[in-house]
Every structure is written in C-alpha cells, then in structure tokens.
Amino acid sequence: MSSSIEAQRPTVAPRSSPARTHEVTNQPPPLVGHDASADPALLAALVREGAGWHLDALRRLGRLAGTEQARRWAEEADRFPPELRTHDRYGNRVDEVDFHPSWHALLEVAVREGLTGAPWADPRPGAHVARAANILVWGTVEQGHLCPVSMTYAAVPALRAAPDLAARYEPLLTSRVYDPGLRPPAGKAGLLAGMGMTEKQGGSDVRANTTTATPAADGTYRLRGHKWFTSAPMNDVFLVLAQAPGGLSCFWVPRVLPDGSRNTFRIQRLKDKLGNRSNASSEPEFDDTVAWLVGAEGRGVRVIIEMVAMTRLDAGLGSAAGMRAAVMAAAHHIRHRRAFGTWLIDAPLMRNVVADLALESEAATTMVLRVAGAVDRAARGDRGEQAFKRLATAVAKYWICKRAPGVAAEALECLGGNGYVEESGMPRLYREAPLNGIWEGAGNVNALDVLRALDREPDGLDALSVQIEAARGADARLDRAWDRLRAELPRAAADPFVARRVVERLALVMQGSLLVQYAPPAVADAFCASRVAGDGGLAFGTLPPGVDTAGILDRIASVDSVTDSIGDTRHERDDGRISL
C-alpha cells in the first residue's frame, strides 16, 4: 500500500541554482534629490525683474520639486487619469470628476505657494515675477495641474470688469488655501476658476459661438448651449462667453449656486487627449444655467481677452518649464553614462547637442521672465511696460511654445531607449510639449495677433525697440539682424502670409538682446551665431565650430550638488574617480 502511494506521488522538478546573468552598471542614478531652482538664468532674472525678496522661498520650492515624493505625485497623476461620474448610485445627475490623490497633492502645493491668484493681492513689487519663477520651477514636476492654476490667476483681471463680483470673490481667487469640492463659492476658503469659450463650430473663432444668454427678472441670465473644450470642470467658477441680446458677452458661472443647489453643468464626456492626461478637459452643456454678466453686453471678447493674455503668459512659462525639465534630464543622463569608451558628456557631438538645448532653454527662461516683469510693472501703472506686455506676450507665447516640442524630442533622444519608456518621465514631457502651442490661440492666431498689434498699437513696437536698442553695440550680428527686421516691418506687418516669419525674427532678436545684456559671453555668442546670424542648422546639435560649450553647459547644475556643474572639464564619476 505504502509503496503504491509513493509511486503515485508527482516528481518534484529540481530547482535551478540561483544565477546572476549580469550586474546593473552604467545606468544613471534617479534624477531626484536636486534643487530644481538651481538655474543661474532663472535666479538672475528673478532679481533683475524685481523679486529678489523671493529667492529663499523659490529655493525651498525647488528642493521640494526635486524630491522623490514630487516625482511620484507626477507619475501617479498621469498614470491614473480623472474619471467622470455623471450620476450617483440613485440616478441623480451629479456631473463630477474624480481625481487621484496625487493630483490634489500637486494642486495643494501650487495654491499654497501662490501660483494661482495670489500676486493680485500682493503689494510687493515683483509679485507676478515671483509667481512666474514658481511656475518655472514647479512646472518641471508636472504640468496638467497648472491648467486650473493658470485660469484662476488669469480670471482676476477679467472679473474686475464686474466690480461687485470682484469685491465678493477676488479674495477667494487670490487665497493660498486649496479647498476642493463643489460647494457654494462664498462659503469656501479658496476658489479655482476656469473658462468656457470655444464651441464645436468655431474653435478660436469665438464670435461664431451659438450659446445664448437670456436676461432673467432677477438680474441674472440663463445660458443654453454647449462648450467644446472646457478644462478642469471641477473648478468652482467659470468665465463663459455667450450671445446676449447685446452681442457676445462674458458671464460668471458657478458650479454651485448660492443656495447650495447645483447649477446646470452637464458634462457630456472627458476628452481623450494626447497628453495633459492628469487634467480633465470636458464638453459641458448649459440648459437654463444661471449666470452673472461680467462687463457690458457685447463686450465679451474685450473682457475675456484680459484672461487670455495672462494664460498666454502661462503658456510660455509652462513651455519654458518643460524645456528646463527636458534639459535637466538629458544633462543628468550624459553625466552618468558611458558609451564607446567615453563619458557622454565628453563626447564632442553630444556636448554640441546638449549645449544647443541649454541655449534654447536659457533664452526661453530669460524671455518669459522679462515678460512677467512687464506684467508686474504694468499692473502697477507703468504705461510703457503695458505696451511692451501687449506685444511681447504674444511673441513669447508663439515662439517658446513652438520650440518646446523639438527640445523635448531631442532631449528624449539623448537618453536613447531609456528615454522612450514611461518610467523615465520623458514620454510625458514629450506628449505635453505641443499643448501650450495650441491652447490660448494656436500659432497662426498668435502670429496674426502680433501683426494686429504692430498695426494698431505702434507704442508696443516702440517699447520693444527700447528693449532691443539697449543691447546695441554689444554684438554686430544682433545689430544687423534688428536693422534689417526694423526696415522690413512696415511692409511685412501688412502681409498675413509672412506673419510667422516676422514673429519668429522678432522673438530671436528679443531673446538675443536679453542674452547679450544679461547672459555670460559663451551663451550670448553661441545664441547670436546660431540663431540670429543663422550659422546653425535646423536640428539641435548644429552649433558652429568655436562655440564655448563648456561655458554653456556650466549653466546646468549637477544633481549631485548645486555648486557642481556638468560643464566643468573634471567630472566626478559614479565610482569616485576624477576624469580629466
């Protein structure tokens, strides 16, 4: 009996002895533990544009942005996108969107650090510059959550067209308290705002909107219609364009009415977007939706354009932050990776590529902070800066957003296959990169807006000329480029066919003038050679011979130490050796 049982037992397969096929070597350490604000161009511009008092707070935010926790928040917010709940379990319409806790963690930091409306309530000169610097730093972590941040910031100047509403709600839009959840706005500790402009049939042509606004006996209006691309639908309030009896008008639309009842805001679906996946973008429908008029009837575009101008600034800031994140990742990789017998940072062609990327990043950062300085001074009554802001915001938005996708793609390529996998974070940067070029007016819209400004508001060009002329004599290539462009502007500004060409050249001359004045000679010379004089190719990594790549790369701080730099000719390796 016993022997037969033994015979029926299954044979146990022999275990293989543990074997190690290889050791993991020559892989960069994680890009964590660094200070994301350790950017000389950023820190110098912060002081130059009037917000030197913010340095300590910015460095603190930079250290948080470089933590493993912040990286994890970004990954989770993107990996677990928002989910729409149209109804509750009983069949009641709720139209709510659920977000991952990491989304809320990112937003809590952003609101607490003053990235929403706080500068409008801050009397200190440079408050808008301080916020812009925060966007450049915190935006290296994750950008989807910056959409509600930006719209809240931009809503404040637009809402001032309705003084009664502004008096009641501006303190909540400028609050540093993140208070999520749909409740009556007046009872919350802080508000987030959104906008509803575009519709299916019109897109950027908002005058083609068909949503109607009918006056009610109580002084409010009732909206009926739809919107095609309304992001962050869980925000508390929205500025919405609709056709009133007097023409296209702007309205204040809360998600929850003062009596606690839900305003009609039927979310039909969430967009399945290329990138920006942490952020919900929706298609809401209005049906007898209660709204309050902002400004006069028929003046909706003029009111909302105040909001658009500020979100365009943030589009430039977001793209510049994305560039900086991409360059930091590429620089970190090549500092810690060997190939074909040498460290990548020592390979001449790789130095050309990353130096070229660093040039683009520094030019974008310097330019967009100059615009932020103009926004700050214009808000305090400087008419010259107001004129400069009007033109330079559109120029910067167009050009920086146009350059971002190429920077992201080239930086990803620096990491090779390592950069093509989701774990690296580079695909998220790559998918995000085209977005700011589309939102708040795509390239053609912005370029044509610049032409209109040149035609209708000559004081804007005068103000920009003052900025550029301040650099005259420092670089002959820049002087020649500006003289040629200035001579062509009267004719070119009247021809829409060349709008992009004109704006591109304006942007390059403006960036060149800033770098010649404020950047080290290595940076200014390489920029003027490759971008202004055209002695560079169409791809990144085509800087001309003789460029001081060490002087450019030295501007990118190492992760190991904010005082170390990858541009030095001595590099401390993972094994502790020093290579000369």
Image (spheres, helix red, strand yellow):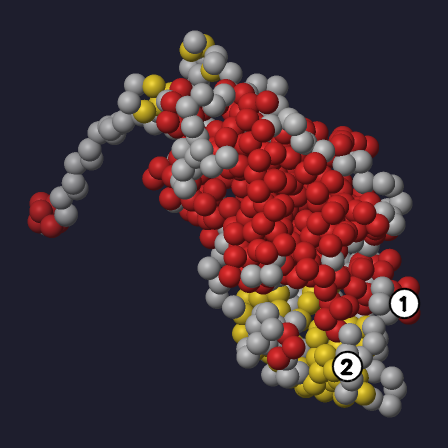
Which image quarter is the C terminus in? top left
Quarter of image, res 241: bottom right
Quote the CA–CA distance across marks 2 and 1: 19 Å
Q: In front here: 113 or 119?
A: 119
The relative height of residue 281 versus residue 64 in the rendered view (above or below) is: below
Whether tag 2 and tag 1 are in contact, CB under 8 A, the answer is no
Label 2 vs label 1, nearer the camera: 1
- x, y percentage for residue 183? 77, 69
Q: Identify the residue position indicated by label 1 in the image.
A: 163
Tell me what residue is drawn at x 64 percent, y 84 percent: 210
Picture disc at residue 290 = 2
- x, y percentage for residue 68? 56, 37
Residue type, label 1: Pro
In the rendered structure, the answer to whether residue 545 lies left or right of residue 144 reads left
Quarter of image, res 131: top right
Q: Residue furthest bottom?
A: 217
The relative height of residue 131 versus residue 303 in the rendered view (above or below) is: above
Tell me what residue is drawn at x 44 percent, y 16 percent: 573
Tell me what residue is drawn at x 54 percent, y 21 percent: 551
